[in-house]
Image (tube, rainbow, N blue to C red):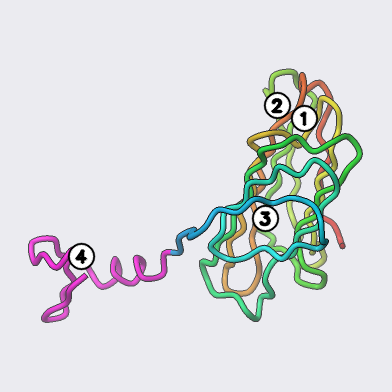
């Protein structure tokens, strides 16, 4: 991107001018720079900014987020399920004492065959430092479940879009909680 006379150009082309606001927004845009497999083993697993994780772990797992003090606005982490969380096992995401933003949202399959209905849970912004997903037969958390973590400048915001398992006839269990 070139600049002359207070104007910004795309690809050094003066005919492709953008505004200062556009240039600032573009400079702040964060991208995912790597893809990693997320599997059990040593726990907790520290998630890294700029990474998309393929979560094939079917057993219990705890993942921590970077500390708020070490994060910047727009930092992003994604987790995509490539495996089905086994019945009774829990995947925990968060960092003790660092609460999810009140804008955080969990969308979970809710007792409807074919993933047709959903329920939601929201973080309260002051007491929910973990998002806990519990596996259940014909419930969740299945292949395609996606979590997107974005740092808003003071707290991590998360959106979790759940996918059912089996025939989806049982409501998935997941909630924001303290540890």
Could you tell me residue 23's position as x and y percent?
29, 69
User: Pointer 1 and pointer 2: residues touching (CB < 8 Å)?
Assistant: yes
Mark 3, other Cα within 10 Å: few <14 / some 14–19 / many ≥20: many
Q: Is 125 one of the magenta-colored residues?
A: no
Range of magenta residues: 1-29
Marks 3 and 2, Cα distance to the nearest angstrom? Answer: 20 Å
Answer with left or right where residue 19 lies relative to residue 92: left
x 63%, y 46%: residue = 54
Percent coordinates x, y for residue 168 in the rendering = 77, 23
Secondary structure under the numbered disc 4 in the rendered image: strand
Q: Are marks 4 and 1 in contact (CB under 8 Å)?
A: no
Q: Which residue is mark 4?
A: 18
On residue 104, the disc is 3
Count up the numbered dots: 4
Quick one: SS at disc 1? loop
* Residue behind mark 1: 110
Label 2, residues with CA under 10 Å away: few <14, some 14-19, many ≥20: some
Q: Secondary structure at mark 2?
A: loop
Packing grade of label 4 (10 A; few <14, some 14-19, many >=20) is some
**79 above or below 43?**
above
- Of labels 4 and 3, earlier in sequence is 4
Q: Residue 72, relative to residue 56: is it above or below?
A: below
């Amino acid at each position: 991107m070139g600049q002359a006379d207070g104007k910004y150009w795309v690809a050094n082309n003066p005919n492709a001018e953008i505004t200062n606001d556009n240039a600032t927004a573009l400079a702040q845009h964060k991208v995912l720079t790597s893809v990693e497999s997320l599997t059990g083993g040593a726990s907790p697993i520290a998630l890294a900014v700029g990474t998309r994780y393929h979560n094939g772990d079917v057993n219990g797992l705890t993942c921590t987020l970077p500390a708020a003090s070490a994060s910047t606005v727009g930092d992003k982490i994604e987790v995509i399920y490539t495996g089905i969380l086994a019945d009774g096992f829990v995947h925990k995401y968060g960092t003790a004492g660092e609460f999810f933003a009140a804008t955080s949202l969990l969308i979970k399959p809710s007792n409807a065959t074919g993933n047709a209905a959903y329920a939601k849970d929201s973080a309260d912004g002051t007491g929910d430092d973990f998002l806990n997903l519990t596996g259940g037969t014909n419930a969740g958390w299945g292949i395609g479940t996606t979590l997107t973590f974005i740092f808003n400048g003071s707290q991590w915001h998360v959106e979790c879009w759940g996918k059912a398992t089996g025939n989806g006839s049982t409501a998935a269990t997941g909630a924001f909680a303290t540890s």
